[in-house]
Amino acid sequence: MSNHPFEKVLIPVDLEPENEKCINFFSLLISQLGHLKSTVILLHVISSGGFLSEHMKNIDVRTELLRQSTLIQNLKEAFIENIIKPHLNKYAEKIEKSSSRIEIKKLIIEGEPGNKIIEVSLKEKVSTLLLYKKNFSRIKDFIIGSVLHRVLYTLYEKNIYVVGDKFNNKEHTKIAKVLIPVDGSMYSNKAIQHAACIIPYLQSLKEVILLRVINPETYEKRLEQGINPEEEAREIVSKGKEVLLKAGTEESLIKTVVKTGSPPREVVREIEERDVDMVIIGRKGRSSLKDVVIGSVSAEVLYQCHRPAVVLINL
């Protein structure tokens, strides 16, 4: 299969234990997609300010001079050799054990993490990124701009996997339940196509749920347009099911669900009640705001659902 979503993958890693989420999840996923050839870039960005503050706490000298000094260079080299490289090697070894068709590249660069992740993604022309999920506030995140926030709102042409707490546990070794919210939009259709590359190969899969939520606010409008919203919803999930069936998914594993209510709220409720492992969702749906980067449903899932892996699909 050419031009598959894992042809070139970027996984930014730091020294936080949350990195295990991404490595565990990707190793689990790629172990079941062993027929695919992939290049994985493990990227560690050294933040100059953070490095200096950590290692030079008790030295009262101008920062800019220290930055150029032999002492700092020696400390940095030791830091890379003794701390960063062992982390990268550990993660690389785990991924390589998952598939024999993986090529691993390890990059260590200096700069502001968010900017460098974006820079490397564009330069290397990666198709997919994996980042770990932290609990964060809408307002705080919007004001100060976290790395995840910046990547999501800048690399809108990339597939981005935001890996949640479920995969922090090494004992969680299954992707058993996958949910795909659908609304018939081109973004939603792209999410189904992405799922079709993965779903048929998940050996531990128990169910894949195609969920269509009818918004009551547009119900009457659709009727006035001569469209029955419930029939339309059933047609949307049926078309999604056909795509998965053609890709080789067993029919008994596919469940179609149509509900009426607030789409963000109902999608989140389904995710939590079913305890799904992975959510594959288009960045936005039938939004009237053409310049919006992440739709209301996608944003709500990211902010509210901390356990599964949430996959935001590009166009």
Image: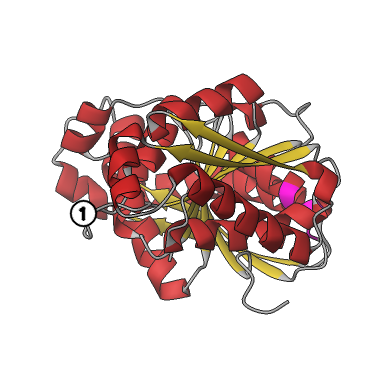
Up-down relation of residue 200 to residue 94 (above or below): below
Residue drawn at 61 percent across, 49 percent down:
88
The span shown in magenta is: 29-33
Pick the residue in front: 306 or 62. Answer: 306
Circle 1 packing at 10 Å, graded few (<14), some (14-19), many (20+), is few
Magenta segment's dominant SS is: helix
Residue 148 image point, x, y percent: 37, 43
* Residue at the far left in the pictured view: 62
Which scheme is used to colour this image of the protein? Answer: secondary structure
Pick the residue in front: 18 or 82. Answer: 18
Residue drawn at 82 percent across, 67 percent down:
35
Q: Amino acid at mark 1?
A: Leu
Residue labelled with disc 1: 289
* Residue at the far top in the pictured view: 273
Q: Is residue 280 visible?
A: yes
Q: Is residue 70 magenta?
A: no
Q: Which quadrant does the N terminus fall into?
A: bottom right
Pick the residue in front: 240 or 193. Answer: 240
Up-down relation of residue 177 to residue 202 (above or below): above
Residue 251 image point, x, y percent: 82, 50
Question: Circle 1 — which element?
Answer: loop
Q: Is residue 123 left or right of residue 259?
A: left
Q: Is residue 267 left or right of residue 262?
A: right
